[in-house]
Amino acid sequence: MKFRHVILATVVGLLPVSFWAGGEQIVLRPSSSPTSSPARHAAEPGGTARPAPDAPAAEGDSVVRKSNQASKRGCGSAAWLRGKVHLCNLFVYDRHSRWSDEERRSVVQRMDDAVRFLVGEAARYRVEVAFSQETLADAACEQTIPTDMFAPPNWIGDAVRRLGYDSVNDLVRSVRQRTGCQEVALLVHVNKRATSYNLTFSDGIHGDFHAERAVMFSRYRDGRPTCAGSYAHEILHNFGAGELYFPFDTDTRRKTLAASMFPDDVMCRVDYNLRRISVGEYTAYRVGWIDRLDPRHKVFED
Ligand SMILES: [Zn+2]
């Protein structure tokens, strides 16, 4: 598989992105776990998984919806996780947070590990994914970058405009033209402690959000570094995967069922050891590695 490395603009301390990520895993645990941290999203080892603002209606307007809606499959700028896939890494900072070279290298390494994990998992389904990554120029945020996933996400558009694009959609258009990759996702990296989340396109979402993006914080709220599995988890969301711990359900029926069917699925849980996690058949269906939904998994579709 071919991995390309492209560096776009350069500002201060731009880090080359390395490629190839190898296969590994992630874990999400229920908030009731005695070892759980106060983490809110799905991608923390031992952390609580809570809904992410998957469905903002427009910039400045976050609307929380069910986490697993079927209409996320096969749409947006990151529709299918197969063939040529391009990931744009954008390191943002504000007056309270900066990136050192070492911190940035660490994130690049975790991204590489996540990509390698996904390539390995895709191969189990006989699907080839050729990832390329690039690091955009750093972008300053005038406002304080919010760590609350429910805060209005307009700061992302502001950061991208500072790089000369009209919008995140415009950035994706430009990347598609330049790289020839149709499948494009933006990873916005923030050097703060918080729960990472994603903005995934689906039916009823404002067109401004066609360009799919994830906001990756370098550390969990408790200070532990965000594991490579969490990066893989969020990338999978952008390609249509849903939560398998069902944070919106009023009972634990589906969560229990998913945990019994896919105990190591990266959308169920994350782990610092990628060998302990995997991409199960239902998640594989959602990202386009399997064409048909197994009737036994229909229960997971909202
Ligand atoms: Zn999640």
Image: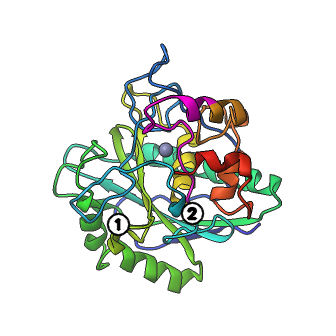
- Give the quadrant of residue 210: bottom left
Considering every residue shown, the one lying at the far top of the view is 34
Q: Label 1: which residue?
A: 11
- Expressed as whole percent of the image width and height from the top left, the position of residue 158 reads 24, 66
Image height of 141 relative to 41, above or below: below
For label 2, the crowd category at 10 Å Cα-Cα, with few meaning under 14, some 14 to 19 and many 20 or more, is: many
The CA span between labels 2 and 1 is 36 Å
Q: Which amino acid does label 2 sit on?
A: Arg
Q: On the rendered structure, is 202 left or right of 205?
A: right
Determine whether the residue tagged by mark 1 lies in a helix, strand or loop: loop
Say whether residue 242 is magenta: yes
* Magenta segment, prevailing SS (helix, strand or loop): loop
Whole-percent x, y for residue 11 in the image: 35, 66
Q: Which residue lies furthest to the left in this view?
A: 143
Query: How would you rate the neighbour count of disc 1 (Cα within 10 Å): few for under 14, some for 14-19, many for 20 or more?
Result: few
- 236 above or below 148? below
Give the residue at x 64% y 36%: 258
Whether residue 219 sits left or right of residue 119 in the image: it is: left
User: Where residue 8 sits: x, y (%)?
Assistant: 46, 73
In magenta segment, residue 4: no
Instruction: Look at label 1 and name its amino acid.
Output: Val
Q: Name the residue under label 2.
A: 73
Please give the name of the residue rendered at 82% of the width and 52% of the height, measured from the top-left corner: 124
Q: In which quarter of the image is the N terminus?
A: bottom right
Q: Nearer the viewer, residue 145 or 206?
A: 206
Q: In which quarter of the image is residue 290?
A: bottom right
Count of numbered circles on the image = 2
Say if residue 109 shows up in the picture.
Answer: no
**Magenta stretch bounds:** 240-256
Q: Do the residues labelled 2 and 1 touch (CB within 8 Å)?
A: no
